[in-house]
Image (cartoon, rainbow, N blue to C red):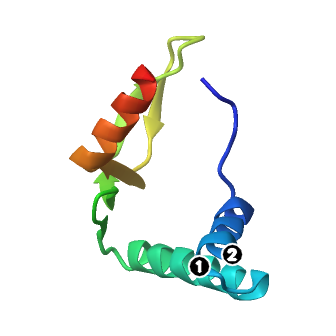
Amino acid sequence: MSNKTLTRMDLTEAVFREVGLSRNESSALVDSVLQHISDALVDGEQVKISSFGTFSLRDKNARLGRNPKTGEEVPISPRRVLTFRPSHIMKERVIDGNRG
């Protein structure tokens, strides 16, 4: 498995090459899309991107956990977590990529 990470700069470069916007416009477009996704999630909305997947928030209740080193019980406070559920198309693309 590759250790390469897709960065914001990589996305900006892809928009620059494939769409033909200037680098500054490409950067602004990528930033704007990511900001819209973030804002929607902060507002508690679900973000569904066709053929890619769904980002959603999940509220987790408080519970008792256990410190694995000491075995001591530790309270875990309630929290909100971000989840991603890939679409069937994305799942198939990843599986097919693993075969190649």
* Numbered mark located on residue 86 in the image: none
* Quadrant of the drawing holding the C terminus: top left
Q: Residue at x 44, y 36 (%)?
A: 75
Q: Which secondary structure lies at badge 2? A: helix
Q: Quadrant of residue 91?
A: top left
Instruction: Give how far across and how far down residue 3 sits, in percent.
Output: 69, 31
Image height of 67 relative to 74, above or below: above
Instruction: Give how far across and how far down residue 20 sits, in percent.
Output: 65, 82
Residue bearing mark 1: 19
Residue type (three-letter) at the residue carrying disc 2: Phe
Depth check, front residue: 19 or 69 = 19
Residue type (three-letter) at the residue carrying disc 1: Val
Instruction: Give how far across and how far down residue 92 sits, in percent.
Output: 29, 37
Q: Residue at x 62, y 73 (%)?
A: 15
Q: Quadrant of residue 12?
A: bottom right
Residue bearing mark 2: 16
Instruction: Give how far across and how far down residue 27 sits, in percent.
Output: 70, 79
Depth check, front residue: 10 or 73 = 10
Left or right: 3 in relation to 85:
right
Q: CA distance from mark 2 to mark 1?
A: 6 Å
Circle 2/circle 1 CB separation < 8 Å? yes
* Residue situated furthest left in the rendering: 88
Image height of 93 relative to 35, above or below: above
- Binning the other alpha carbons within 10 Å of mark 1 as few (below 14), some (14 to 19) or many (20 upward) gives few
Residue 55 appears in view? yes
Q: Quadrant of residue 52?
A: bottom left
